[in-house]
Image: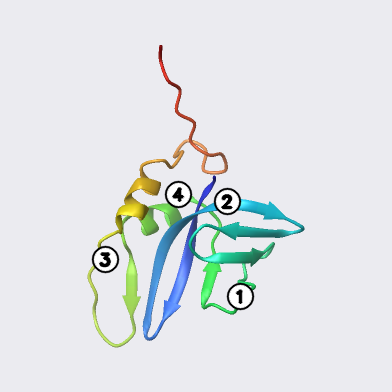
Amino acid sequence: GLIVPLLLNRANQTRVAIDSIDQVSDNKLHCNEHGWFDDQGQPLEGQSVVLLKPTKATMAAACCGHQWSFAKRTTPRTLSLREMLLAGNINWRNLKRPHVRVKKI
């Protein structure tokens, strides 16, 4: 599915992550790891996560592990294997379309 950035707010730390959309229905969409969101990007299950518009800036921030802590300085986080695999499948030329790999025979 389409790979999208998310803003996660957790206990004095904010970070940008990536997830993939796996289901769309009735003005709602479901991300594989973070659950359901409405058409405005707000979570339906009460989490402190916001779906962001996929721009080159937000996608680059997510792929680089950007995070902020309001108590102290933080270094970029290491991406999980899942996020690294998703980052490798981003269609950087057109972020609104999933990356399609063409197999050569």
Q: CA distance from mark 1 to mark 2?
A: 17 Å
Task: State yes or no: discs 2 and 3 in contact (Cβ < 8 Å).
Answer: no
Under tag 3, what secondary structure?
A: loop
**Closer to the observer: label 2 or label 4?**
2
Amino acid type shown at disc 2: Asp
Between residue 89 and residue 25, name the one nearer to us: 25
Disc 4 target residue: 56
Q: CA distance from mark 2 to mark 4?
A: 21 Å
| N-terminal-most mark, 1 or 2 | 2
Q: CA distance from mark 2 to mark 3?
A: 25 Å
Under tag 1, what secondary structure?
A: loop
Q: CA distance from mark 4 to mark 1?
A: 27 Å
In percent of the image, x 36 and y 42: which residue is there? 88
Amino acid type shown at disc 3: Arg
Q: CA distance from mark 3 to mark 1?
A: 26 Å
Disc 1 target residue: 45
| N-terminal-most mark, 4 or 3 | 4
Instruction: State the image coordinates of residue 76 (x, y, percent, origin top left).
Output: 26, 66
